[in-house]
Image: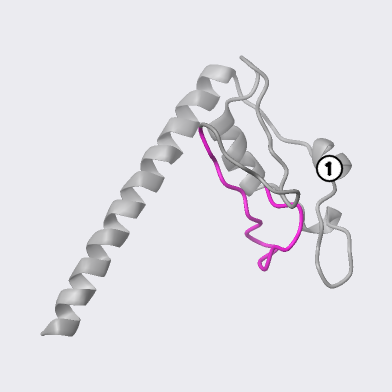
Amino acid sequence: MAEDGASDLKNYPVNYVNGRIWVNNHAHVLQGKEKIANNKFLSYAMSHADIESVLVGGGRAKLNADIMMNLDVTLPSFTEQAKIGAYFDNLDHLITLHQRELEKLQNIKKSM
């Protein structure tokens, strides 16, 4: 989750990553506690949390770690979180596939 530098405060940058990754000091790395918070669901929940009112800073909004750790996030049962996370993951995959298909069709249209 971005710490600062976000250009769109309504859609604050949150990215789900699985595996090894290098992250600089301008991001918060979150991981759900085992059997309490599913990471895919947590990613979705944090991307939809209303954080605009708790951001600090002047020209560049910043999400402090202390404030982020105190955000209220409603968590259903772990099993339900896993199902919701998988559902949204599948939707993201389908959207990506349709975006690629649209780009191909737009290129075909341009060439005609």
**15 part of magenta stretch:** yes
* Left or right: 79 in relation to 56: left
Please say whether residue 9 is one of the residues in the magenta stretch. yes
Q: Is residue 60 above or below residue 34?
A: below
Residue at mark 1: 65
Q: Quadrant of residue 109?
A: bottom left
Q: Is residue 63 above or below residue 108?
A: above
Query: Residue 70: horizontal and vertical position, in percent?
Result: 84, 37
2 or 99, nearer to the observer: 2
98 or 21, which lies in front?
21
Left or right? Give the position of 89 relative to 51. Answer: left
Identify the residue at image location x=86%, y=44%.
Answer: 67
In the rendered view of the protein, which quadrant contains the C terminus? bottom left
When the figure is inspected, residue 18 is found, relative to residue 52, above or below; the finding is above
> Is 31 in front, or is 79?
31
Residue range (magenta):
1-18
How many marks the image carries: the answer is 1
What is the x, y in percent for residue 40? 53, 33
Please report the residue visible at 49 percent of the width from the left and 33 percent of the height from the top: 85
Helix, strand or loop under label 1: helix
Report the predominant secondary structure element of the magenta stretch.
loop
Q: Residue at x 62, y 48 (%)?
A: 47
Q: Position of residue 26 (x, y in %)?
A: 74, 52
Question: Tag 1: residue type?
Answer: Ala
